[in-house]
Amino acid sequence: TTPQSTTRFGVELLAGAAGGGGVQTAGGAIVQGMAWAGLSSSPASEWRVGIGGLRSVRQGQATPVIELSWTRSFGMAGR
């Protein structure tokens, strides 16, 4: 993606602890993978749509994830 482009694509892999509120993870560790596409509505903000999955590490249970989000850049990446 070029700096002048208003469309961006990316992938994310997140890992962490979860549980409580009826979430059964057999130890709490989960992993989430996500592929997304973003469309800039201004130089500092972006709408994203994504698809991926969430998996419990110990039990192996998985669920699909669909995301619609708005992100905001605070301009600190260059520092």
Image (cartoon, helix red, strand yellow):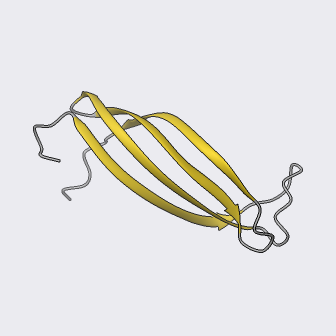
Quadrant of image for the C terminus: bottom left
Asked whether 49 or 44 is in front, the reply is: 49
Q: Is residue 38 left or right of residue 65?
A: left
Q: Is residue 33 left or right of residue 12?
A: right
Task: Identify the residue shown where x is 65% and y is 56%.
Answer: 54
Task: Identify the residue shown where x is 24% and y is 36%.
Answer: 7
Task: Identify the residue shown where x is 48% and y is 34%.
Answer: 69
| Direction right: furthest residue | 22
User: Residue 17: percent from the left, percent from the top?
Assistant: 70, 66
Quadrant of the rendered image containing residue 26? bottom right
Task: Identify the residue shown where x is 41% and y is 36%.
Answer: 48
Report the number of numbered marks.
0
Relative to 12, residue 51 above or below = above
Q: Is residue 27 left or right of residue 74?
A: right
| Direction top: furthest residue | 41
Asked whether 33 or 70 is in front, the reply is: 33
Q: Is residue 20 left or right of residue 48?
A: right
User: Residue 6: percent from the left, percent from the top?
Assistant: 20, 33
User: Residue 50: percent from the left, percent from the top?
Assistant: 47, 41
Relative to 53, residue 47 above or below = above
User: Residue 51: percent from the left, percent from the top?
Assistant: 51, 44
